[in-house]
Amino acid sequence: MVIREHYLKQIRPFYDSDLVKIITGIRRCGKSVILNQVQDEIKAEGNKCLFLDFDLKPTRNMIPDADALINYVNENIGEEKLYLFLDEIQNVKGWNEACRTLRLYNCSVFISGSNSKLLSKEFTKELSGRYISFRVRPFVYKEALEYASQTGKKYSITDYLVWGGFPAALEQDDINAKRRYLNDLNDTIVYNDLENRYKIRKKEEFERIVDFILISNARVFSAKSIADYMKGKNISVSVPTVIKYLEYLKEAYVISDVALYSPKAKAKLNYYYKLYNEDVSMNSIRVSGSRYDLTHNLENVVLNELLYMGYEVTVYDNKGKEIDFRAEKDGKIYLIQVAYSVAEEKAYEREFSAFSNIDNSVKKIIITNDDIDYSTSTIYHYKLTDFLLMKEL
C-alpha cells in the first residue's frame, strides 16, 4: 500500500477540528484508502475510532438515514472523543443533516463519497462554513512507481503517459485488461453517474461532446469552438449547453480548465482556456489501435503534476506566443514550456523562441522527454524523468 503522505500532511492539522473533513476527487482515485490511512494514524495514538462503509448493504440496511446514523453514533460515543469515518456517505438519506449534527458532538467527522451524488458544489450548499475539503487525485508518477515496486511490476514513463495513474489500472498485467478496467470506469463516471444525475435526455449528443473533449486534451477551447466543431459533425448544440456539459465534467473532477494569463491585465482571461483530463488514460481509451497521443498526454501529465505540487497554473501569452504554463506559488513565478522532444532543430527553435523578450527575473523552464540536457544560460531544461520525481520546481 502506498502511504499517501502528500495528502495526509494536509489533513493532520484538522484531525481534532469540529469541521467536517471531506475527502473528495474522481472515482477510484483512492479516497477510501486515504480515509483508512487517517484512521490508522489516529488509532495508533490510542484514540477511539468508528468506521462505517455505506457501500456495504448490511451497513446501509442498519443505518438508512440521518436519524439512524445519529442514534448509532450516540450509542457508541463515550466521554472520550470519537473519531468518526463515514465512507460513501451519499448512501445515507439526509447525510448532510447528520454531519451538521454530529460535528457538534464530542466527535471528529471524516467523510468521503461518490462523485455521482457528492459533487463539489454540494459541499457549499449542504455544509456551508462547516467543512474543509481535500482534493485527491489519481497517482502521480512518483506514487505509481512506488505502487508498481510494491506489486513487483515495472511502470515506465511511457506506460504512465498512456495508462495514467488510476491505482487499480496499475494492477492489471496486460493492455487488454487495463483497457477493459478503464473503459468500465469511464462508463461509470461519464455516462452512468452524470447522465443519471443530471437526467440528460440527449445522451448521444452528450457522449459525442464528452468523447471529443477527452480525446482533445491540452488544446485551446472555447464553448463556441466546441459547438462549432459539433455542428460540423451534424450535431446541433447551443453554446449554453456546451458550457453546462463542461461544468458537469469539472464538478465530477473529470477535467480541469486552465485560463489565459494576460501580462497586460495581470489577470486571468476566462473566455480562453485549455482543457486537461484528470487522468491521461481518458484520452488513451478513446484512441483506435496503439496511436496514443503521447505529445498532448505529456503536457497533461505536467499540468497534473504542477497542480499536485500546489501551484496556481495559467496559460501565458507572450505577445502572441503561447507559453504552456505560468506556475505561481509562495510568490515565486515560473514560465514552463512543454514538448515531447526538441531534438530536431525546428522543434528546438519553436519551443525555445516562446521565451523571447522575457527578462530573467522569472525562471524559464522547458520540459521534454529527451535524455540530452538542452539547458541554455537563461532557460533550464528539465528531463521529464527528473521533473516527475521533483517535489518542487
Image (spheres, rainbow, N blue to C red):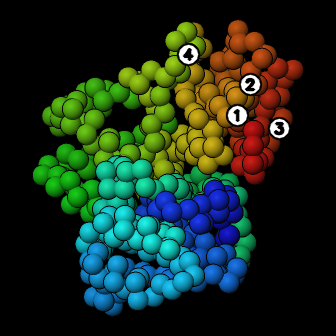
Can residue 6 be seen in this snapshot? yes
Question: Under tag 1, what secondary structure?
Answer: loop
- Quarter holding residue 10: bottom right
Q: Residues within 10 Å of mark 1 (few under 14, many from 20)?
A: few
Percent position of residue 62, x then y: 30, 89
| Amino acid bearing label 1 | Asp
Image quarter where the C terminus lies is top right
Q: Which residue appears at 43% of the width and 55% of the height? A: 130
Q: Earlier in the sequence, mark 4 or mark 1?
A: 4
Q: Residue at horizontal 49%, vertical 36%?
A: 218
Give whichever of discs 1 and 3 has the lower sequence position. Answer: 1
Q: CA distance from mark 4 to mark 3?
A: 35 Å
- Say left or right for 127 vs 318: left
- Disc 4 secondary structure class: loop
Q: Which one is earlier in the sequence, the residue at label 1 or at label 2? A: 1
Question: How many angstroms separate mark 1 from mark 2 (CA)?
Answer: 17 Å
Residue underneath mark 2: 364
Q: Amino acid at mark 3?
A: Ile
Q: Which of these two is toward me, 180 or 86?
A: 86
Q: Give the side of residue 148 with respect to residue 73, left or right.
A: right
**Residue 244 position (above or below residue 11):** above
User: Mark 3 — residue?
Assistant: 372
State the image quarter where residue 68 is shown.
Answer: bottom left
Q: Amino acid at mark 2?
A: Lys
Give the percent coordinates (x, y) of residue 233: 22, 35
Marks 2 and 4, how far apart in space? 18 Å
Nearest to N terminus: mark 2 or mark 4: 4
Labelled disc at residue 330: 1
Q: Are marks 4 and 1 in contact (CB under 8 Å)?
A: no
On residue 266, which mark appears?
A: 4
Nearer to us of marks 3 and 2 is 2
Q: For the view shown, which residue lies furthest in the right direction?
A: 377
